Image (cartoon, rainbow, N blue to C red):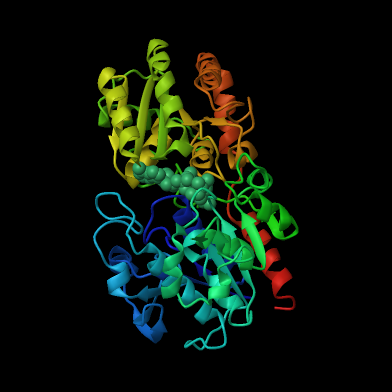
Amino acid sequence: MKILFATSEAQPLIKTGGLADVSGALPPALQDLGVDCRLLLPGYGPLLDRLGPVREVAHLGGLPGGLEGRLLQGSLPNSTVPVYALDIPVAFQRPGGPYQDVTGHDFPDNAWRFALLGKVAARLAGPATPLDWQPDVLHCNDWQTGLAPAYLHYQGRPTPSVMTVHNLAYQGIFPPHVLANLDLPPQSFQMEGLEYYGNLSFLKSGLYYSDRLTTVSPSYAEEIQGEHLGMGMQGLLANRRGSLRGILNGIDTGDWNPASDLHLPGSYSARAPAGKKQCKAALQQELGLVQEPRAPLFGLIARMTHQKGLDLVLAVAEGIVHRGGQLIMLGTGDKLLEQAVRVTAARHPGRVACFIGYDEGLSHRIEAGADCFLMPSRFEPCGLNQMYSLRYGTPPIVHATGGLRDTVENGVTGFVFAEPSPHSLWLAVERAFDLYSRPAEWKRMMLAGMHKDFSWEHSARQYLGVYQELAPGT
Ligand code: ADP
Ligand code: GLC
């Protein structure tokens, strides 16, 4: 089975969120099952720096906007999974992140940039590929690769495609005039196609033209067919429910292992959990919190967006401090949320701390050093941090939604609350305080989480099943 996995981020090459974790871990897990899985990514500057030795394997002409590019081949660090980097410096090598400039604004030409990615994915998947390798299935991820199934459709569907929705909130919506520059026929711009309320939607294109749809947890697969979380796509998704599957993400159990995690000042495991205390003391010191070994320490790591429910956490911060707890928040994103987080930390020196920014090492140290993890997301397609928390003996407090509902057992491995409201979250926080004051019971919950198996193998088998439906006999 040959799979081309097209994505806009992959750990450890380039990352803004969970899509990168999945793109960095699922392909090696598929490879372990005997699948020849290869990645296609934009050749961003930092990605090319981290990719190591590469060779040019193709020259690509006739791309949208009359551009030319090169395809460079390297491999995913610490694995033998091949990576094709689409090298078009004018599109992908600029200051800022993958989608935004240094001031946090979307690049104005994102439609064109990610049309290039989709176009090249479709070309590599079809008979006109310049490579001596053609996939049996093209696997696309999120809106950034959403045009690829449309390009394949207008090539006569030579190869089947799968579209995975990691987050329906990001849809890649652009004004209709950009279509003129994207090499798609005008008739694609209709309701039965990529038109969406008068605009062009990259995500809708993927949802409409791909052969199979998956999303990253069974609960989210149900939720997105309804009005509440369907983000306007519920009709199309409900129509395609026969082709839609919810496959829970796994986690990279090599990167996220408290027994061997090099970011930590000490190591521990379910059998020898004592090192966790050392991680907590070091974390309190690192972020200037009062050194109190018995103060329940709550941690949070998130992109700071409305989705993640940070406002709910800020609403209970004072209560946490009053009950003798401590709180650490790590994240970056919405400037108003960042500011509100800073203000809350400044109000409670020594008890509440924050780090605004992106810090891989600190994210590991919070997972290990905190006693309890906060994840009150309003919606969560899968969520990875709650699984990291379970593995690190840091029972999570989660809202009953999407993948959070599918991975945390209320009262057994963590605390699940029903409503995304400060009151509902606060009741769960109080339950955590109460249980924490009964060390034997707390330890039982920690160990129950640490014994859960969230490795990728099981999920990778389910993806393989989807590929086999599309390419039987391979
Ligand atoms: P999402 O993809 O919606 O952001 P996930 O829980 O699936 O949510 O994945 C988020 C990933 O990004 C996790 O690996 C998390 O640790 C990481 N992450 C998010 N923000 C930061 C940050 N500021 N610093 C370090 N890692 C972060
Ligand atoms: C998205 C979702 C998150 C999911 C991740 C990887 O960014 O918000 O819930 O875990 O993608 O699939």
Q: Position of residue 179 (x, y in %)?
A: 46, 70
Is residue 212 depicted above or below 251 in this figure? below
Horizontal relation, residue 396 to residue 68: left or right:
right
Is residue 263 depicted above or below 120 in this figure? above
Nearer-the-camera pick, 369 or 148: 148
Q: Quadrant of residue 244?
A: bottom right
Horizontal relation, residue 41 to residue 448: left or right:
left
Residue at position x 55%, y 58% from top? 196
Which quarter of the rendered picture does the N terminus lie within?
bottom right
Horizontal relation, residue 217 to residue 25: left or right:
right
Q: Position of residue 447 (x, y in %)?
A: 57, 32
Residue at position x 60%, y 31% from top? 413
Does the image show residue 145?
A: yes
Q: Quadrant of residue 446?
A: top right
Is residue 254 depicted above or below 298 in this figure? below
Residue at position x 58%, y 51% from top? 249
Q: Position of residue 222 (x, y in %)?
A: 69, 45
Nearer-the-camera pick, 364 or 301: 301
